[in-house]
Image: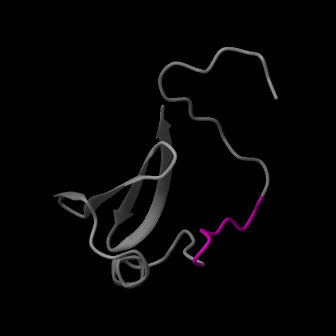
Amino acid sequence: VSQDPPIAGVCYAPVHVSLSAKTGKGIELGATIDEVVKLYGEPTERFAVGPMARYRYVAMYHQSFEWDLVFRNGRLVEWTVATYE
């Protein structure tokens, strides 16, 4: 476990490897909005501007978790998970 301080803000860097990342229920980049809603239900919040849509799911387990899913033209292009103590 790293002892470095957490990065403040958002950091983007080019990815030089190809990998297949999936959620526990099998959702991966390129999934449709309908596929996500079928597996995870309606989001806690949703926002849409033009071809972009953001779905936010919030859940409380041993701590609070927040998932942000970004869709472009109905396809998943980004997801972010945050946890709060």
Residue 70 image position (x, y, % from top left): 38, 58
Q: Is residue 14 left or right of residue 12?
A: right
Q: Please give the count of numbered marks on the rendered protein.
A: 0
Q: Nearer the viewer, residue 46 or 29?
A: 46
| Quarter of the rendering containing residue 52 | bottom left
Q: Nearer the viewer, residue 45 or 65?
A: 65
Q: Which residues are magenta?
A: 18-25
Residue 21 image position (x, y, % from top left): 67, 65
Q: Is residue 16 left or right of residue 21?
A: right
Q: Residue at x 35, y 64 (%)?
A: 72
Q: Is residue 49 magenta?
A: no
Q: Is residue 44 left or right of residue 11?
A: left
Q: Vertical placement of 77 versus 84: above or below?
A: below
Main secondary structure along the magenta-highlighted residues: loop
Q: Nearer the viewer, residue 10 or 67?
A: 67
Q: Residue at x 47, y 62 (%)?
A: 77
Q: Quadrant location of the N terminus? A: top right
Q: Residue at x 27, y 61 (%)?
A: 53
Q: Is residue 12 left or right of residue 73?
A: right
Residue 81 image position (x, y, % from top left): 50, 48
Q: Residue at x 18, y 60 (%)?
A: 50
